Image (cartoon, rainbow, N blue to C red):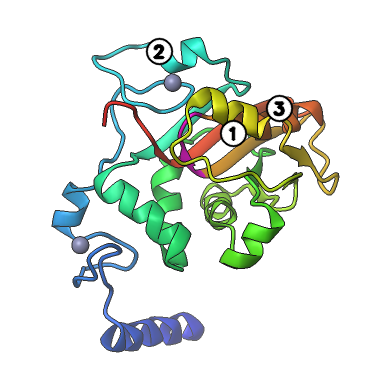
Amino acid sequence: MRQERLQTLLRGALRLVYPPRCLTCGGLVESDHGLCGPCWRDTPFLGGLSCDLCGVPLPGHSDVAEHCDACRVQERPWAQGRAALLYKGNGRKLVLMLKHADRTDIAGPAARWMARGLQGLDAGTLVVPVPLHLRRHLRRRYNQSALLGAALARELGLRHCPDALRRNRATPSLDGKGAEERFATLDGAISVTGREDLAGRSVLLVDDVMTSGATLSAASLACKQAGAAQVMVSVLARVAKDT
Ligand SMILES: [Zn+2]
Ligand SMILES: [Zn+2]
């Protein structure tokens, strides 16, 4: 009890020195790890009806799982996919800050947004982040997907397995490439390391962004080849074509 009081006091003292700030604009906010009102309103959170495989928003309402056009054309080797945000406006800004600006503090709140769409997962589900190639990992010093994976695993009470997958080769930047080229580039680019036994397990793959889904496909196939019983996908942001 005394320790709890001490922690509360310390937290109060810290807040005087470092009052909580909005993640994107730096303005003062009421609670830690949040967005201010205007930034919250500018952030395209995904609620409502969305594609059950990739999270892209769909018009209307439905009581059954619906799939978007892209997921009807492109085979998805995972069972379900969820996205917390659209990759535009403040959604894009948050991803880029997490990825390139050392804003690792975004991972915690981002994981809370991602966790909302992931209730009721099997307690034995393994959280597996999409890996970076070693060279890119060294240059960036951290893998943003592993930061999200760690925070999401904590949020959901699941085990995080950051070493389950690896990139077999450095793939060039996919920016500006079409879906077909992305799938060709990523084909066989990811495999299991053998450090985690995925056989018969449910796997929750985690990445920061889903564009064509080529990277998540390569990662999913690697998990399934290693015997994973089921793969689900969770991304912070989904790129939608018409946005
Ligand atoms: Zn703000
Ligand atoms: Zn879809």
Which residue lies at the image location 53% right of the left edge and 56% below the top edge? 144
- Residue at image mark 3: 221
Question: Horizontal and vertical percent for residue 29?
Answer: 21, 68
Question: Horizontal and vertical percent for residue 199?
Answer: 82, 32
Amino acid type at image mark 3: Leu
Which residue lies at the image location 60% right of the left edge and 27% below the top edge? 183
Whichever of callouts 1 and 3 sits on the residue coming sooner in the sequence is: 1
Placement of 86 over or under 19, stated as above or below: above
Could you tell me which secondary element the residue under label 1 belongs to?
helix
Whichever of callouts 2 and 3 sits on the residue coming sooner in the sequence is: 2
Could you tell me which secondary element the residue under label 2 belongs to?
helix
Name the foreground residue: 88 vs 108. Answer: 88
What stretch of residues is rendered in magenta?
208-212
In-image side of 212 versus 14 (left or right): right
Amino acid type at image mark 1: Leu
- Residue at image mark 2: 69
- Residue at image mark 1: 216
Question: Horizontal and vertical percent for residue 227?
Answer: 81, 27
Amino acid type at image mark 2: Asp
Q: Identify the image quadrant of the C terminus.
A: top left
The picture quadrant where one finds residue 25 is bottom left
Which residue lies at the image location 35% right of the left edge and 23% below the top edge? 50
C-alpha span from label 2 to label 3: 21 Å
- Label 2 CB-ligand 2 distance < 8 A: yes
In-image side of 200 versus 238 (left or right): right
Q: Reply yes or no: does residue 113 show up in magenta.
A: no
* Whether label 1 touches label 3, CB < 8 Å: no
* Whether label 1 touches label 2, CB < 8 Å: no
